[in-house]
Amino acid sequence: MSESSFLSILLISFGILFVPFLSRLLRIPVAVGEILYGIVIGESVLDLVEPSQWLSFLSTFGFLLLMFAAGLEVKLREINSLPLKSKFLYTLIPSLVFLLSFSIGKKLNFNAITCIAVGAISVGIVVSVLRERGLLSTHYGKTVFLVGTIGEVLSIALLTLLSLYYEHGLGFEFWLGVGKLILFLVVARIILIFLKSFVWWYPDKFKFFFEKNPSEIGVRISLAVMFALSFGASLINVEPIIGAFIAGMIFSTVFEETENIEEKLSGISFGFLIPIFFIYVGINFLMPHIDIHTLKLLAILVALSFAVKVIPSLLLVLENYSLRQALGAGTLLSAPLTLVVVTAELGVKMGLIDHHTESILILLAIVTGIGAPTLFNLLVRRENESSNS
């Protein structure tokens, strides 16, 4: 192993170990801290670590696990159990988010990938903040989480359709791609029904898989499902991360008692591979030339990202929440850190944006990732935490 490779391993290991402590001291999300750490050791600042094939592989693996974990957060059972009014409202809010994002973005001459980045919703930071505040188990916390969940599914769907459109246009190949995607979802649905039936008929056998055992069969099953659907997605020219996301949804829907497996996956995922993904994003980050135009564009993107989330979230007053709680929900949903990074990376891969725009979108993710939780904590105070519980 070369001296530079050994130094890269040492620096990344150091970051994985100490960034969570530094992030806690700075009161910023750990993922933001990992990106910032990657920027510091990458070519933008100290230039101590260079991109490499093995780092790229570990980062891609972490990327898939990140989307699989996002899929695990999608609780279809909870969404199906909602009253019809709530289902409609929770779907309407993220739909209006993207309607506003594309409408305003078009007037500002933003391309589609930037509009998706502005409107993107992800539950990563949402869950973290709600859990930290003890709100996740309350009615209010579940409402914000479910709105975020539906928003994340919609965000992934739009990214998928956009990738098909820019690869094939609106011709026959596009509709063939949509047909393949629908077929893929139908097959995934059939697998879901089959597995649910199998688990229902043979609960004791499946229970064994998710108990503690030396072979870790449950972990192997989850990873096999993730890789199988990721490979299946790639066969129909859909991003593998879409397959990983769907795999997570299937896994969490079929196997209800998976806390033990999620805990084990969380250890290797959030304790090692996913941090490598975020640090590698920072290492590859190229600091854009900071001038008045760049700062103005960043300010517009940040303001727009908050506005398109907060305005539709005001509809939560129809669910008997206070105006302050509705504002807080919209503010917290304005921190889709992981999905903005994903969108920026896919945008470059598809050739829709250059590295300069990618860097600005990553700065957008960092700013909203720090600002949104801070504003939420100011808006949703202690006296509101017990209401609607």
Image (spheres, grey):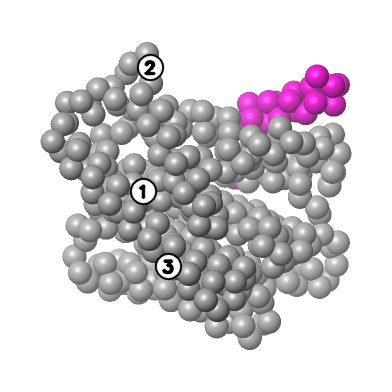
Which residue is more in the foreground, 247 or 236?
A: 236
Q: Which residue is mark 2?
A: 215
Magenta span: 1-28
Mark seen at residue 83: none
Q: Label 2: how many residues lie within 10 Å, few (<14), some (14-19) or many (20+)?
A: few
Q: Amino acid at mark 1?
A: Met
Residue 130 shows up from this direction: no
N-terminal-most mark, 3 or 2: 3
Expressed as whole percent of the image width and height from the top left, the position of residue 183 reads: 38, 60
Secondary element type, mark 2: loop
Q: Label 1: how many residues lie within 10 Å, few (<14), some (14-19) or many (20+)?
A: many
**Magenta: predominant secondary structure element?**
helix
Q: Which residue is mark 3?
A: 179
N-terminal-most mark, 2 or 1: 2
Determine the CA span between mark 3 and mark 2: 39 Å
Q: Which residue is mark 1?
A: 249
